[in-house]
Amino acid sequence: MGGNNRGSGTSALLVNELKVGATPQSPEAPRAVGLFAVILHRLTYPFRRGARPAPHAATGFYTDTTVCIGCKACEVACKQWNQLPSDGFEFTGNSYDNTGALTAESWRHVKFVEQFSPHEGEPPTGSPYNPFPTPDSLTTLASPQPESPARFPLDVLPTPSPAKPDFARWLMMSDVCKHCVTAPCQQSCPTGAILYNEFANVYIQADICNGCGYCVAACPFGVITRSHFDGHTHKCTLCYDRQKDGLVPACAKACPTASIQFGPVAELRERAHRRVADLRAKGVDAKLYGAEATETYSELNSFYLLVDEPEVYGLPPKPVNPWVHMRGDYLRSVAVGVVSLGVLLLSLLLAGG
Ligand code: SF4
Ligand code: SF4
Ligand code: SF4
């Protein structure tokens, strides 16, 4: 698990794990004394603002899907830490993944994408890319890799191509809120329930959410849903409470392969680019998703390393912030209003004449 905390910016987080347990609780604020003081306190308390938190470098996730083993420890850790209720248990019948989707009760979802050779009935070739082991491939698997001596060659994943048509693989990807740098959910919320916290993470204040569902429609990744339990929307908080105490988010802490890496985003991006270069040098078609802004969408502070097209993982290949289209919509609305008014005035004039 120490692999989640690699790098100078995140190494201090490890030390904090033990310190936090020994930290005394902060003393309670002095209570008002006397009836008038109590009434005054109750009337004014909701309008008081606490001290603004100190700004912090933006934090996020870099998820390296090539080393995800689909254990779902991240899902369980998230449920446990955040005390999320069960959203039922059903066999989906189409995969070993029975979580199905991100919901207000499942803030992490490990996708199992199954890809098998189109040449049905043909025996596996035993190439180093083939997961069905032959004596030769077992020898290859057992050999330390010169580039990465501590690891088995999880790095070497097949990339379907006419030259290598026979393959079978599961792509595992732990999905979560992308903590978009410019988040449509936050832009669309009419009550101000969604905000950016001091870590530049997108955070829903459920008690201010009125359950209108605008954010559900605005998110291009289908992350947010409304809870059947309380009617509010919920999603990953990037473990704000843990970060406040200097701890790694529960999912990243639980991930045994460092597929989920947490830390300052700038550091994560550098690490991810190095990993892509390393994989490409080994012939793997690795690419980052969300690490850079596009014409229609901002960077994602929770970004991914993929080895296939985004749509294979159920991600939109070109996410669009609905706001991009709304300027035109506003202009059209104003134009239609002006024309309607003109027609109305003209009708009145003609009727009067
Ligand atoms: S992924 Fe969706 S829910 Fe998460 S910040 Fe972006 S728009 Fe909001
Ligand atoms: S950061 Fe925390 S809330 Fe978000 S998915 Fe991980 S464990 Fe869940
Ligand atoms: S991201 Fe990590 S914890 Fe989650 S399923 Fe993959 S390997 Fe397991």
Image (cartoon, grey):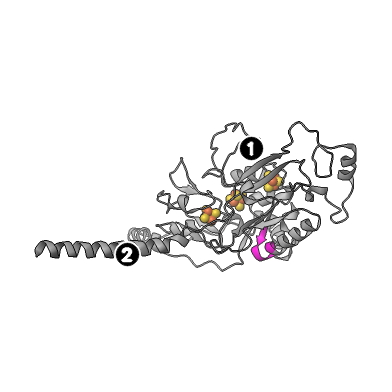
Residue 30 seen in render: no
Marks 1 and 2, how far apart at CA: 50 Å
Who is closer to the viewer here, 217 or 27?
Answer: 217
Q: Relative to residue 25, is residue 126 drawn left or right?
A: right
Q: Relative to residue 253, is residue 124 drawn left or right?
A: right
Q: For residue 20, what is the image quadrant?
A: bottom right
Identity of the residue drawn at 60% across and 46% down: 314
**Residue 129 horizontal/vertical position (percent):** 80, 44
Residue 149 seen in render: yes
As shown in the figure, which amino acid type bears the numbered disc 2? Ala
Q: Relative to residue 251, is residue 336 drawn left or right?
A: left
Near mark 2 (Cα within 10 A), the count class, few <14, some 14-19 or many ≥20, is few
**Residue 282 horizontal/vertical position (percent):** 81, 55
Does 234 appear in magenta? no
Q: Secondary structure at mark 2?
A: helix
Who is closer to the viewer here, 165 or 327?
Answer: 165
Query: Sequence order check: which comes first, mark 1 or mark 2?
Result: 1
Q: For residue 44, what is the image quadrant?
A: bottom left
Dominant secondary structure of the magenta stretch?
Answer: helix
Which residue bears the numbered disc 2? Answer: 335
**Residue 228 horizontal/vertical position (percent):** 46, 40
Does 268 appear in magenta? yes
Q: Residue lying furthest left in this view?
A: 353
Q: Over which residues does the magenta segment extend?
A: 262-269
As shown in the figure, which amino acid type bears the numbered disc 1? Asp
Label 1 close to label 2 by CB (< 8 Å): no
Which residue bears the numbered disc 1? Answer: 97
